[in-house]
Image (cartoon, rainbow, N blue to C red):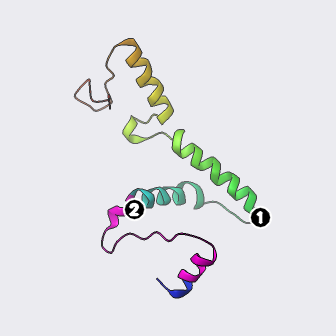
Amino acid sequence: MTDEWAAACAAGHAARSMSRKARSPDNARCEGFFGTLKSDFFHGTDWRGVTFAEFREGLGAYIEWHGGGKPKKALGRRTPSEHRARSWATRRSGGPEKRPGSHSAHASRY
């Protein structure tokens, strides 16, 4: 880390967060999210003429979609809200839900 970077963070009242040396799992989830954000949202878009306010609004909408509206492989290509609704309905009916690819009817009950 450079002194210039440290000074810029201090001037902006930003907390620096760095993982320990050779400990990439410390921030793997965050790194994964930023990789997905760049490929889904940023790359392949012509940002010329887009104001900061428009960018911020689009970024906020993307984060909302990513958190609840984007289909997830681990949920059988359902969105988290679809998964929760289906799990809730299954629990209310008393029947177990079997996840795609699981061998146990109880696998989806977390």
| Drawn side of residue 78 relative to residue 43, left or right | left
- The quarter of the rendered structure image containing the C terminus is top left
Residue drawn at the location 33% of the way across and 75% of the way down: 21
Residue drawn at the location 43% of the way across and 36% of the way down: 77
| Badge number at residue 49 | 1
**Magenta range:** 6-28
Where does residue 11 sit, x and y in percent of width and height?
63, 78
Question: In whole angstroms, how far apart are the C-alphas of marks 1 and 2?
Answer: 33 Å
Where does residue 48 sit, x and y in percent of width and height?
73, 66
| Badge number at residue 82 | none
Which mark is first along the chain, 2 or 1?
A: 2
At label 1, the amino acid type is: Gly
Disc 1: CA contacts within 10 A as few (<14), some (14-19) or many (>=20): few
Disc 2: CA contacts within 10 A as few (<14), some (14-19) or many (>=20): few
Q: Callout 1: helix, strand or loop?
A: loop
| Drawn side of residue 74 relative to residue 54, left or right | left
Indicate the quadrant where residue 88 lies: top left
At label 2, the amino acid type is: Asn
* CB atoms of marks 1 and 2 within 8 Å: no
Is 39 situated above or below 106? Answer: below
| Residue at numbered disc 2 | 27
Looking at this view, name the residue that lies furthest to the top: 93
Where does residue 29 sit, x and y in percent of width and height?
41, 56
Residue 21 covered by magenta stretch = yes
Residue drawn at the location 34% of the way across and 13% of the way down: 94
Residue 98 covered by magenta stretch = no
